[in-house]
Image (cartoon, coloured by chain):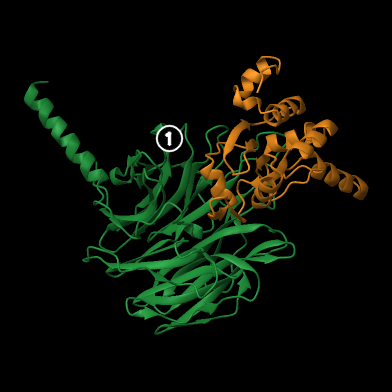
């Protein structure tokens, strides 16, 4: 190979690498405050970001005002900065806000005073908050069914455990009307349901969650075609039984879900490896009822370190794109991503701007019709402060 | 199989597959409560980070935490905390930060369960033990922390040296 050919191949390689890994330089979503301000991006299903037409919304919880509060910040695509954050909870401590596109704005849900609430938000203002249940509740996720209707799912605490409930939300201008809530599945046979999330599409509404009634956490899915009746739960993860005498097998937690035109994708954190922490596994289904075998998402370079905070979205071509954080470089967590193409997950790609000497973690993904991938994560500085960062990328180029 | 045999088989199945929770007979508290107790008493915190369905947690519970001497020593010398590494209950760190049990497990970079931590009253980690531990090892761990041998060397050296290092 002569020098010219080597240079040409090298240049092509660099071009491909850049095309496959490009996210914009990040901007701040939230201000950088003191070291005693703690930011959390911990929505169930990692629904901390949503995109509606030309606007992106990010929700989080922080304590900069002296207690945990939930906030939202909006940014139009062509603006260079996010609008000032707006507090969305009413008056008490708030946790785990989540967001979904709705109407010309967004629906946000959060936990407050041992219950779950929701309200509409757009650039013009906020609607009235609506309490979705009178019982003890937490972990809310919302998905749009049509332009004016959404469904919310959350976890209610019962005397015998925890159970996922759902309700339709009707949106009229900036007001929400909540329908009657109901359990998604039998709460007697599954007594420890948690971390619900959902997605709506042509095949129906798919709700996924974790439950440990069998002794260890497992991932389940249930489908509804009418937003009222759900199919019997189907276990999606494969439980690996390691001992006949002790334990209940490997666990699986924190499911996330996305849907393309022809299939559902569910990813989760899977504790089937003995000494390397959680690994990311996923499955796909064309009907939301029968699921593929489990497939690992991280590549072999991530084998020796745990993966955390997996999020999933779809590119405009319908390919699943996953992002997560891990510490394979040995100096704190960084953000990585992989995409599913030609029947397999790609090599893992480092998000260059989400790699530093301190943890860059808690990533969450969104996407828009133009093919842009929207990424947020928590940035920890060397000085011990943290803030939320945002970057936008494009569908990875074909290799 | 007759009905009695079926019931018996069901009972054997229930007790035969041990599941992990905090071991019985110990006054385990929540993480936040244990740290508050520790600040008041000055005792270190013994933090058991477990997981439902964890085989080595169940084995440690059955074979080690059943030891009467261990129960007495741990209960006397530590404030005891149990955290479900996959739990969604919220707890508060000494910094004031509130996060879930699962988020704490991530913060502690837990690779598997069980993990046994010794913590200072301010929540800072003294040391940790991964995986199944015998009662003898846990008793040595109790002595290593209580007598502050950790100030002069690692736990493995303490054990390998016949537990003779001086604080």
Q: Residue at horizontal 20%, vertical 40%?
A: A16
Quadrant of the image occupied by residue B158: top right
Chain drawn orange in the picture: B
Q: Residue at x 42, y 38 (%)?
A: A332
Residue at image coords 64%, 76%: A134
Residue nearest the observer in this picture, A295 or A359 = A359
Q: Quadrant of residue A39?
A: bottom left
Tag 1, which secondary structure?
helix
Q: Is residue A245 above or below residue A262?
A: above
Chain corresponding to green in the figure: A
Question: From what the image shows, is residue A218 above or below residue A55?
Answer: above
Which residue, as the protein is rendered here, is positioned at the far left?
A: A4
Q: Is residue A311 left or right of residue A275?
A: left
Tell me the residue that label 1 is attached to: A302
Instruction: Please give left or right for residue A240 compared with residue A159 in the image.
Output: left
Outermost top residue: B161
- Horizontally, is B77 left or right of B104 in the view? right
Residue A319 x, y percent position in the rendering: 34, 52
- The answer to whether residue A315 is visible is no
What chain is tagged by disc 1?
A: A
Dividing the picture into quadrants, the one containing residue A392 is bottom left
Q: For this rendering, which residue is in front, B141 or A255? A: B141
Q: How many neighbours does mark 1 have within 10 angstroms: few (below 14), some (14-19), or many (20 or more)? A: some
Residue A174: give x, y in percent of width and height: 41, 83
Q: Quadrant of the C terminus of chain B?
A: top right
* Observer-nearest of A120 and A241: A120
Give coordinates of residue B21: x percent, y percent.
Answer: 72, 45
Instruction: Note whether residue A354 is visible.
Output: yes
């Amino acid at each position: 190979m002569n020098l010219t050919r080597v240079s040409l191949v090298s240049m092509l390689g660099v071009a491909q690498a850049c095309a496959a890994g490009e996210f914009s330089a990040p901007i701040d979503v939230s201000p950088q405050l003191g070291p005693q301000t703690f930011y959390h991006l911990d929505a169930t299903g990692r629904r901390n970001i949503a995109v509606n037409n030309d606007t992106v919304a990010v929700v989080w919880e922080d304590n900069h005002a002296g207690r945990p509060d939930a906030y939202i910040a909006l940014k139009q695509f062509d603006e260079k900065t996010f609008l000032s954050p707006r507090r969305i909870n009413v008056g008490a401590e708030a946790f785990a806000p989540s967001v979904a596109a709705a109407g010309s704005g967004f629906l946000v849900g959060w936990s407050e005073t041992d219950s779950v609430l929701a309200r509409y938000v757009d650039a013009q203002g906020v609607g009235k908050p609506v309490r979705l249940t009178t019982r003890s509740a937490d972990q809310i996720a919302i998905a749009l069914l049509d332009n004016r209707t959404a469904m919310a799912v959350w976890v209610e605490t019962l005397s015998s455990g925890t159970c996922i409930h759902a309700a339709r939300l009707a949106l009229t201008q900036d007001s929400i009307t909540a329908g009657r809530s109901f359990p998604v599945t039998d709460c007697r046979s599954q007594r420890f349901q948690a971390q619900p999330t959902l997605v709506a599409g042509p095949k129906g509404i798919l709700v996924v969650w974790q439950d440990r009634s069998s002794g260890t956490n497992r991932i389940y899915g249930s489908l509804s075609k009418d937003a009222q009746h759900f199919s019997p739960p189907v276990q999606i993860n494969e439980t690996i039984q390691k001992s006949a005498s002790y334990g209940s097998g490997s666990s699986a937690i924190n499911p996330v879900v996305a849907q393309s035109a022809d299939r559902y994708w569910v990813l989760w954190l899977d504790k089937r490896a003995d000494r390397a922490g959680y690994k990311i596994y996923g499955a796909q289904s064309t009907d939301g009822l029968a699921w593929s075998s489990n497939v690992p998402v991280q590549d072999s370079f991530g084998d020796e370190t745990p993966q955390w905070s997996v999020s999933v979205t779809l590119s405009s071509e319908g390919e699943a794109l996953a992002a997560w954080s891990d510490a394979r470089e040995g100096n704190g967590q960084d953000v990585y991503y992989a995409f599913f193409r030609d029947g397999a997950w790609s090599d893992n790609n480092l998000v260059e701007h989400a790699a530093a000497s301190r943890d860059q973690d808690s990533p969450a993904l969104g996407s828009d019709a133009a093919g842009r991938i929207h990424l947020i994560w928590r940035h920890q500085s060397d000085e011990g402060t943290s803030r939320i960062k945002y970057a936008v990328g494009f569908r990875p180029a074909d290799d | 199989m007759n009905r009695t045999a079926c019931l018996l088989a069901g009972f054997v199945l229930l007790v035969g597959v041990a599941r992990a929770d905090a071991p019985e007979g110990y006054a385990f508290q929540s993480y936040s409560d244990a740290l508050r107790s520790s600040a008041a008493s000055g005792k270190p915190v013994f933090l058991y980070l477990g997981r439902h369905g964890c085989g080595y947690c169940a084995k440690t519970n059955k074979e080690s935490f059943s030891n009467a001497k261990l129960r007495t020593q741990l209960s006397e010398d530590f404030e005891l905390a149990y955290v479900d590494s996959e739990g969604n209950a919220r707890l508060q760190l000494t910094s004031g930060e509130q996060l879930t049990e699962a988020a704490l497990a991530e913060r502690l970079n837990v690779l598997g369960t069980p993990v046994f931590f010794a913590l200072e009253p301010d929540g800072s980690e003294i040391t940790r033990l991964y995986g199944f531990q015998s009662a003898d090892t846990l008793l040595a761990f109790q002595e290593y922390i209580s007598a502050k041998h950790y100030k002069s060397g690692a736990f493995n050296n303490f054990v390998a040296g016949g537990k003779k290092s001086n604080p």
